[in-house]
Image (tube, rainbow, N blue to C red):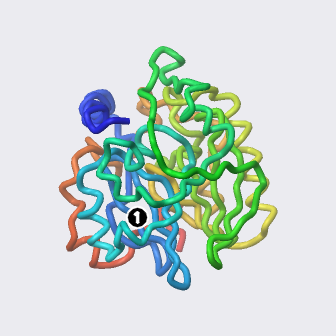
Amino acid sequence: MARKDSEHQKKSMSALFRGRAIFKPLNTGWIDGHVACVREWIANIFFYTRNGTTVMIDAGYNYERLREKMGWLDIDPASIRDILITHQDTDHVGALETDSELLFKNATVYIGEIENRYLTGEKRRKVFHGLYKLPMVKTDNKKMLLKDGQIFFIGEIKIECILVPGHTWGHMVYLIDDTYLFTGDTIWFGADGGYSFISTLAEDNRLAVQSLKKLEENIRARNRRIAVVTGHTGWTDDLDFAFAHRAEICKPFTRHYSDPEAPYDGYVEDEDTEENARSGLLKKRGRRGSP
C-alpha cells in the first residue's frame, strides 16, 4: 500500500466511521514488561521482547511517524529482524511497502501460506461485501510461510500459529510464549465484551464466527492466563470478556455496537504523546468491577 493510499484510507475511513465509536486503539505505550505497542491512527502494532530479542507483530500503515513513536518506547527499528503478520490488510503491512521508509528492510516477514496469496496477486482483498478491492501490497522483504498449528522459535521466544479465516482467507493469530494471543482483526471489543470483527470488512462473516468459536475452544483448553491483544480495540486477560459475544458480528452502522468509551474519530491522535507513553502501563479491557 503506497503512502498516498494510506493517506487516502485515513481520510475515507475517518469520514465513514466518524461518530460510530467503533475503533478504540491503545495509545503508544507498554502493556507490561514484555509487550509494547505503537498507535497508528486507529491501528496498533506490537512488540514482544524477551531476553534481548524483540519480535514485531504487524506493520501498520505506511505511516510517517513510526520511527518517532518507536523512539518513545526506546525501540530502534534497526533492531527488528522478525515481523509476524496476522493478515495483509493495508493497516497491518504498510511499513513493509516498497515505497515506505523501509525501516525494516532487513527483517524477515512471517505470514500464513494462504494469506501470502494476496501478496502474490493470486487473490485480491475485497471489503464491503465484495464491492471494493483494496490496493495490492508490494514488499521485497524475505518471507517465511507458515501453516496452521505450526510452532517455531525466534531466539527463546515460542510462537504458535493458529489459522482463523473469515476476516481474510488466511488470517493467522499468534500465541507467544503460551501467554500472549495477538489476534489482529479476529475480535472486536465493545463495552460489553468481544464480538466477531467488523462485518463490512470481512471476506466471509459466517466463516469468521466459526473460526472465533474454534479459537475460543483452543484457548480455554489451555487452562491458563492468556492476554488477548487485538489490533484495534485494546487488550484483556479476561477470557469471559474477550469471547462474550463470539457468535455475534460487530455491525458498525448499528448503534448497538458502539462503544461509548471509544473516541468520536479514532484517526485523531491528540492523546497519543511521548509523555503519556512513558507515564505508565496501558489499561486493560474487562467487565466492570473485574480486577
Q: Tell whether 168 sits left or right of 276.
A: right
Q: Residue at x 65, y 45 (%)?
A: 112
Residue 193, how many percent across, how many down?
55, 51
Q: Residue at x 28, y 28 (%)?
A: 12
Number of numbered labels in the structure image = 1
Residue 232 appears in view: yes
Secondary structure, mark 1, is: strand
Residue 288, how many percent across, how many down?
49, 62
Residue 279, how many percent across, how many down?
27, 78
Q: Tell whether 64 sits left or right of 166.
A: left
Q: Amino acid at mark 1?
A: Cys
| Residue found at the far bottom of this picture | 51
Q: Which residue is mark 1?
A: 37
Figure quadrant of residue 116: top right
Q: Is the N terminus in the top left, top right, bottom left or bottom right quadrant? A: top left
Residue 156 in the image: above or below residue 267: below
